Image: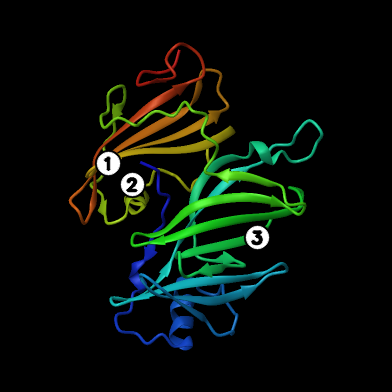
Amino acid sequence: MKLLVTALALCSLAQTGAAATNQALYEIRDAALPGACDAPMPAVSHAIDQGVLHQVPCRMTAWDGLDVFVLETESGMEVLKFPAVDYRVQNAPSGLPDWSNATITGIRNVQQLSSAHVSTQASIIRSASRVPPGLGSGQIDTVYRLEASGPVLESVTYITDAGVLHPIWPQPDSGSAQPVPYDLQGFNPVEQPQAAAGRVFDVLDKLDLGLDAPLAEGRPALRVTATGQGTRLAIDVEETGWADDSVDGQVHRLLLSSDGQLWRVMQIGQAWICARGTERVRAAPCP
């Protein structure tokens, strides 16, 4: 099963039966992002399978414009949050940024998209933003697909001004990835408060696993893999690259089950990722 990186919708702002006037959309936008938006331009509305997607201008930057997206359905209106990856780019021996080896360091949610374009037939949203100064000359191209569960991250690509493409997400498969088993064999059980939600990443957010928190010292990277079968889903969240001679990082395994409406966490385990020895992942401390 391909891992779907999805985001939370801001359900607390749902307004059943609210008229989708510009004023109503501005109020929802400003409630989600207090003081962040000042663009008075009218919203652009797109008819999609899920309802109507309102692209509401937020503010202008030196490079582009930022938009907030409000999804209107029969149940009301809600501001969408979009999953975004944090990444690290190391310099090549030449001293220039080496985008061919960009490393994922985290996953977070954002409510504003830069230079966004909507393809209504495929429910695709494409966003483009210039790379920060010092990291090259080009833009980050991000593609989302809108599903019933919310926005799903399809791809993140660095495109140089010369047209050279460097994929960032999903990262190239080394061919060594294995299915995640639905058990905690080799893991230390972890007590967590009961968590259930309609979307998988709503559940992860409730567990506070630190997907959007600064990682450990060193050159950390975050890798999320998942295997699903029927109503069961096993997820491994690996944090590697710690500045330690023996411990390269840690991994959390989450075992989830769905009743058709809600995903529930059944068990959680933790193990160490060792930098030396024959066992890469083990419950006991690394040698």
| Residue 204 spot, x, y in % from top left | 35, 48
Mark 3–mark 1 Cα distance, whole angstroms, equals: 38 Å
Colour mapping: rainbow
Sooner in the amino-acid sequence: mark 3 or mark 1: 3
Residue at 27%, 28% (x, y): give it: 184
Q: Is residue 72 above or below residue 188?
A: below
**Residue assigned mark 3:** 129
Mark 3–mark 2 Cα distance, whole angstroms, equals: 31 Å
Question: Image quadrant of residue 265?
Answer: top left
Viewer-proximal residue, 154 or 208?
Answer: 154
Quarter of the image containing the N terminus? top left
**Residue assigned mark 2:** 207
Sooner in the amino-acid sequence: mark 1 or mark 2: 1
Residue at 29%, 33% (x, y): give it: 190
Q: Amino acid at mark 1?
A: Gln
Q: Is residue 218 above or below residue 82?
A: above
Q: Which mark is residue 192?
A: 1
Label 1 sits on a secondary structure element that is loop
For the residues bearing labels 1 and 2, Cβ distance under 8 angstroms: yes
Mark 1–mark 2 Cα distance, whole angstroms, equals: 7 Å
Question: Image quadrant of residue 57?
Answer: bottom right
Sooner in the amino-acid sequence: mark 3 or mark 2: 3
Label 3 sits on a secondary structure element that is strand
